[in-house]
């Protein structure tokens, strides 16, 4: 790898690090929109959807979900685990769904409209 | 439902109670023995131990419970534990002849003033919270 390549990778890494901050909520909400999940499933789903670019620690997910539950954005129901005890299956509440929809409309969909779409793909 | 009295706060209160009992015992003993320098030394150690313990338990509580209180619960707990132990020490007659009850009441009065100020600050900062969670801590 040349010096220029290293410089490019360093800058890209720094940009991505900043860009990814604050994204966990979106990935959690999108994964839960797909269907109720327990924490490990949520972790796997986030890694799959983001093609491995977002990796959430289990503790971090628990903490975030507890906070979202407190703020009534997610709820959970108990379901059977594979072999062990019952698991908490998290799902979006109507408030969570409406928040996700508003957020996507305001901040994501604009990337699918002209001229941004063309600029991104060019 | 978030708890106001958390495991970390109980740990802090318990350790503070132990420190304060030890401090009171040491203070009264050293004053009676007229070892003035050691009185200063244990006071500094006592203050440093409170600071470190409050910082560690408070930090852990912030990570586990995300309830925003601007540190007010820790400050209030410190005042209550210190006040109760100190008042009890005098009521039981365990103090030295160099100590007077005014040495407890005056700091408690000043502390109460700071608690009122701290609570006011908390009420102002609370405007930046939603459901008791600071806005910047909700979405990560």
Image (cartoon, rainbow, N blue to C red):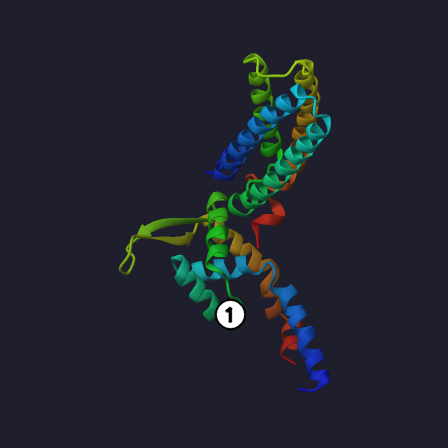
Query: Residue A48 location in percent, x, y?
Result: 46, 70
Q: Quadrant of the N terminus of chain A?
A: bottom right
Q: Please provide percent x and percent y for residue A94.
A: 45, 49
Which residue is disc 1 drawn over? Answer: A50
Q: Residue at x 48, y 38 (%)?
A: B7
Is residue A74 or residue A1 the one in the foreground? A1
Residue furthest toward the left?
A: A83
Q: Is residue A120 left or right of residue A70?
A: right
A42 over B17 or under it: above or below: below
Q: What is the crowding at mark 1: few (fewer than 14 residues within 10 Å), some, or many (at least 20)?
A: few
On the image, which quarter does residue B75 sit in?
top right
> Residue B83: x percent and y percent?
60, 21
Quadrant holding the C terminus of chain A: bottom right
Q: Residue A68, how many percent across, how many down?
A: 49, 48
Q: Is residue A115 left or right of residue B87?
A: right
| Residue appearing at x 62%, y 35% in the figure | B50
Residue in the foreground of this view, choosing between A35 and B3: B3
């Amino acid at each position: 790898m040349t010096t220029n390549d290293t410089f490019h990778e360093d800058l890209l890494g720094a940009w991505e690090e900043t860009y990814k901050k604050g994204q966990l909520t979106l990935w959690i909400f999108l994964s839960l929109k797909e269907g109720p999940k327990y924490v490990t499933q949520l972790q796997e789903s986030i890694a799959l959807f983001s093609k491995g670019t977002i990796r959430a620690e289990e503790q971090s997910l628990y903490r975030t979900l507890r906070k979202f539950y407190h703020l009534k954005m997610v709820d959970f129901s108990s379901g059977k685990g594979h072999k062990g005890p019952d698991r908490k299956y998290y799902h979006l509440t109507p408030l969570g769904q409406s928040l996700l929809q508003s957020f996507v409309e305001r901040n994501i969909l604009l990337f699918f409209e002209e001229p941004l779409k063309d600029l991104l793909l060019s | 439902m978030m708890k106001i009295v958390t495991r970390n706060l109980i740990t802090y209160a318990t350790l503070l109670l132990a420190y304060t009992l030890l401090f009171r015992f040491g203070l009264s003993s050293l004053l009676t023995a007229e070892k003035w320098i050691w009185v200063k030394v244990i006071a500094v150690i006592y203050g440093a131990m409170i600071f470190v313990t409050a910082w560690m338990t408070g930090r852990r509580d912030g990570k586990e419970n995300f309830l925003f209180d601007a540190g007010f619960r820790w400050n209030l707990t410190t005042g209550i534990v210190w006040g109760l132990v100190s008042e009890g020490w005098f009521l039981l007659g365990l103090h030295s002849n160099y100590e007077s009850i005014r040495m407890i009441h005056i700091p408690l009065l000043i502390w109460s003033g700071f608690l009122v100020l701290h609570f006011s600050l908390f009420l102002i900062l609370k405007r930046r919270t939603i459901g008791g969670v600071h806005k910047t801590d909700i979405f990560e």
